[in-house]
Image (cartoon, rainbow, N blue to C red):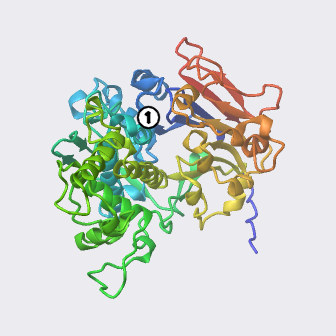
Amino acid sequence: MVIEPTPTAGTVNKKVLRSVRVRMYRQGLGDCFLLTFTNTDQKQHHMLIDCGVLPLSSGGSGRLDLIAQNILAETGRHLEVVVATHEHADHISGFKSASEFFGLNPEEKPPQPVQVDKVWLAWTEKKDDEQVKKILAKTNSLALAVTAAVQGMGATQSQAIQDILLFEGASLDSDGALADQGAGTDQGVHKSEGAGFDQSIPGKTKFKIAKTMVQIMDLLRGWGPVDYLEPNDVRELPEFGIKFHILGPSRKMSMLGGSTLNGQASAVSDPGRRLKSTQSTAFMAAATKFAGMELDEMPGEGLSKADIDAIYKLSLPFDPARSLSLDEAKKPYPLAEDAKYPEKLQAGYRDFFKELYGFGDESAGHGPEWRRIDTDWLQMGETLALQQVSTINNTSLVMAIELTENGKVLLFVGDAEEESWQTWETKNADLDKLLANTVLYKVGHHGSINATDQVMLNKMTNSDLVALIPVDMKRADEKNWEFPAKTLYDPSMAEDNQKGVLFKRTLGRIILNCDEEGCMNCDPIFDENKPWPGTISMDPTPEKLWVDYTLTF
């Protein structure tokens, strides 16, 4: 039982928070939010949460320059807190591409420096943390395997994988090399300080995976004192009546530095235990060998070079006795001196593979290479690319911003996926109560269906709930991505209990960055006939850089 203290004579319960304005910038497919808290003394507290855009997005880095200028004008070049939720281009690339205005690049210091009081990062950005090292080892192995897949498949066949790599700021340039698009001039992207692969393979395209996202995080670390936040942490602003509850990423999430894959023991550490070829380990071993790369170990999986060789053999789709290597199929006639194979049969045998499966020279009448099983299986690279992106998504810093005077909550989840939601924790507040009091939900990963846990979403029961979806529907349509997922927001699906859940929870109060045609210069979608607890306004200039949602108390 808690007994509230009796106010003493002369005590006044003074309200300290006057308004909260959430500005959602419209740079394209990416997140950039400026939160401005104003107290009753007219003092303001500015918090910038992410600033990025997907490479080649319809908005592009040019709009980020304009957005950076707007941020500095609105804040008087003073940001109390800058939050970078996770290392993906659509969330942090703007800190580098617009560094001329932010003053992050030491060589491009603006005449008026930008003051940043604090930088907030998740614990997953602590370089010396042992669990973080495991995460990096895992993403390193995944990156090498995915690169090998793109290498082996070529630019055309690997387009789906390339599209996924855009979230890490990477794409293939006109020469087929992996190049950065929108976060500086470095080639490629990978989440690891030691992940600079430079693979030169005879007869193959040269790939380089550099460290652009890590470099941006390093720039942010130098922008102000860094606070690495853990789940259950709370940060308070008493003079504004605000608490920041950190819900994730959880250290208990298996995706983030858990035990070795499927509990496999190394053949070296436990010779009596039989290694198994899992989907991911088999692909890593086979893809790297196919591309001519050598993988000494898979530290994220606890596997040595000997283990990798063993798994590679297990990964082969047929027993070696029933397989024909490409080198053997290419051998000139005759294949072998064997009475069982007449010369005519031997020639036909060789021509069969040449005409149907190809040796790489379609102009000479050879069949397309993609029909061979040695390249078809490389499509597994798309699955691993998604796994790599998901791992980094689940390092997202998740914050429930509680307005303590009225209990209302603003929920910012970065791109945390369902697995992350299910591990959220807080010792200093009731999680269900925070969700029930949520009046603003920044929708994860541009409305992707796997970035909102529907069980948790159903706990958001506040009648004032509003959803903000930063999205570029035109760009998403071009890539066949369902951003946002109609099963989340489409009112036509609201009758089905399993569909339209976001629409039902918000009673239709959903603000998108752009309409169904995906135009950058159009009004956001929302039903003006519904009662809104806050006010909505748009940038009146032709650029239409932002949409504001303001709660006033």
Residue 22 location, quadrant: top right
Classify 10 Å Cα crowding around label 1: few (below 14), some (14-19), many (20 and above).
Answer: many
Is residue 487 depicted above or below 342 in this figure? above
Q: Residue at x 44, y 22 (%)?
A: 63
Is residue 387 depicted above or below 22 in this figure? below
Residue extending furthest top?
A: 542
Image side of residue 400 versus residue 235, left or right: right
Percent x, y for residue 443?
61, 42
Is residue 297 depicted above or below 69 in this figure? below
Percent x, y for residue 83?
45, 44
Percent x, y for residue 86?
43, 48
Percent x, y for residue 367?
34, 38
Is residue 4 depicted above or below 60 in this figure? below
Residue extending furthest bottom?
A: 272
Circle 1: element type: loop
Judge by depth and name the residue closer to the eye, 101 or 267: 267
Type of amino acid at the residue the image marks with label 1: Gly
**Observer able to see residue 237:** no
Q: Residue at x 31, y 26 (%)?
A: 100
Image side of residue 474 versus residue 267, left or right: right
Q: Residue at x 27, y 48 (%)?
A: 350
Q: Quadrant of the N terminus?
A: bottom right
Q: Quadrant of the C terminus?
A: top right
Q: How many numbered badges does the structure rendering display?
A: 1
Residue on which the image places disc 1: 52
**Observer able to see residue 285:** yes
Q: Residue at x 53, y 58 (%)?
A: 248
